[in-house]
Image (cartoon, rainbow, N blue to C red):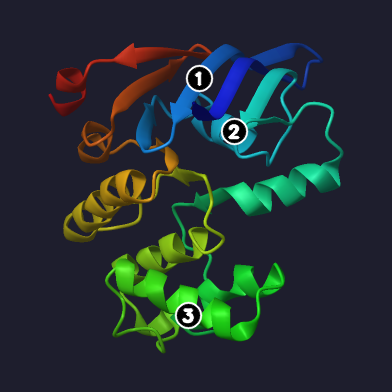
């Protein structure tokens, strides 16, 4: 069963001349639990727009999105926000960690906001930081962490609420090769280990080659790309 689904998804904007700019044009996509899907494409092709729609950060012009079996169309904004907070985790190119808080406190934050008591929030945050290889760095603030450590903290934070879906937008775009590869390996492990439905937007061929499927966004539509073509 798909944990994330888009049906005939379209997004259109009005240009400065009043004409319509079609960014996404009738996209269909199904992502299963434990599956990692990479989306590649030229800059400006609409990859981030698609990710924002899939994660319920924006509304489509037409079409439907289902997250964990629930259709978003017709939902009030508050209900969409509640579903998103429970079921979707986000990782962006820049970690957006709160610099005045430790790694542990940053990961605890979404749990505390959701009403989880402090003891349980701390326990889960510790376990997640251990899982991403930062068990010895939990009391460090972001400024004392390397770029790779900051991004792995952001991954732990994205997983705090035990989401069904993880969406990542150029997650290694700000990292050197060594830290990129470590992060890529972590994504692959987490998708299968936690049975996440994962969609990763990336220009990085190494990350794309680790995905179960690679799709290219071009002219508003998704097409399948064979893995050897990605690696080449």
Q: Which of pointers 1 and 3 lies earlier in the amino acid sequence?
A: 1
Q: Residues within 10 Å of mark 3 (few under 14, many from 20)?
A: few
In percent of width and height, residue 179 lies at: 23, 60
Quadrant where the C terminus sits is top left
Residue 12 seen in render: yes
In percent of width and height, residue 221 lies at: 50, 12
31 left or right of 88 in image: left
Q: Which residue is mark 3?
A: 123
The residue at the point 57 percent across, 60 percent down is 161
Q: Residues within 10 Å of mark 2 (few under 14, many from 20)?
A: many
Q: Tell me: residue 186, above or below residue 144.
A: above
Q: Residue furthest front?
A: 1
The answer for how far apart the CA atoms under marks 3 and 2 are is: 30 Å
Q: Which residue is mark 1?
A: 29
The answer for how far apart the CA atoms under marks 1 and 2 are is: 10 Å
The residue at the point 37 percent across, 27 percent down is 40
Q: Tell me: residue 84, above or below residue 38.
A: below
Q: Which of pointers 3 and 2 lies earlier in the amino acid sequence?
A: 2
128 left or right of 96 in image: left
Q: Nearer the viewer, mark 3 or mark 2?
A: 3
Nearer to us in this view, 38 or 175: 38
| SS for dot 1 | strand
Residue 98 seen in render: no
- Residue 54 marker: 2
161 left or right of 41 in image: right
User: Are dots 1 and 2 in contact, CB under 8 Å?
Assistant: yes
In percent of width and height, residue 87 lies at: 60, 48
User: Are dots 1 and 3 in contact, CB under 8 Å?
Assistant: no
The residue at the point 47 percent across, 62 percent down is 95
């Amino acid at each position: 069963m798909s944990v994330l689904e888009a049906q005939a998804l379209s997004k259109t904007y009005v240009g400065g001349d009043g004409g319509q700019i079609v960014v996404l044009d009738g996209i269909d996509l199904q992502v299963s639990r434990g599956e990692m899907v990479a989306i590649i494409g030229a800059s400006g092709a609409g990859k981030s727009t698609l990710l924002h729609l899939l994660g319920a950060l924006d509304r489509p012009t037409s079409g439907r999105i289902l997250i964990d079996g629930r259709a978003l169309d017709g939902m009030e904004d508050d209900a969409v926000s509640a579903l998103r907070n429970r079921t979707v985790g986000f990782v962006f190119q820049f970690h957006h960690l709160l610099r005045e808080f430790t790694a542990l406190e940053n990961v605890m934050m979404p749990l505390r906001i959701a009403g989880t008591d402090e003891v349980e929030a701390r326990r889960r945050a510790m376990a997640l930081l251990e899982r991403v290889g930062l068990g010895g760095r939990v009391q460090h603030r972001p400024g004392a962490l390397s770029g790779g450590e900051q991004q792995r903290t952001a991954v732990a934070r994205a997983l705090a609420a035990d989401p069904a879906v993880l969406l990542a937008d150029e997650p290694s775009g700000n990292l050197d090769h060594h830290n990129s590869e470590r992060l890529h390996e972590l994504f692959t492990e987490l998708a299968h280990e936690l049975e996440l439905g994962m969609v990763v937007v990336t220009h990085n061929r190494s990350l794309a080659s680790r995905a179960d499927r690679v799709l290219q966004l071009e002219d508003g539509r998704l097409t399948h790309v064979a893995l050897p073509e990605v690696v080449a």
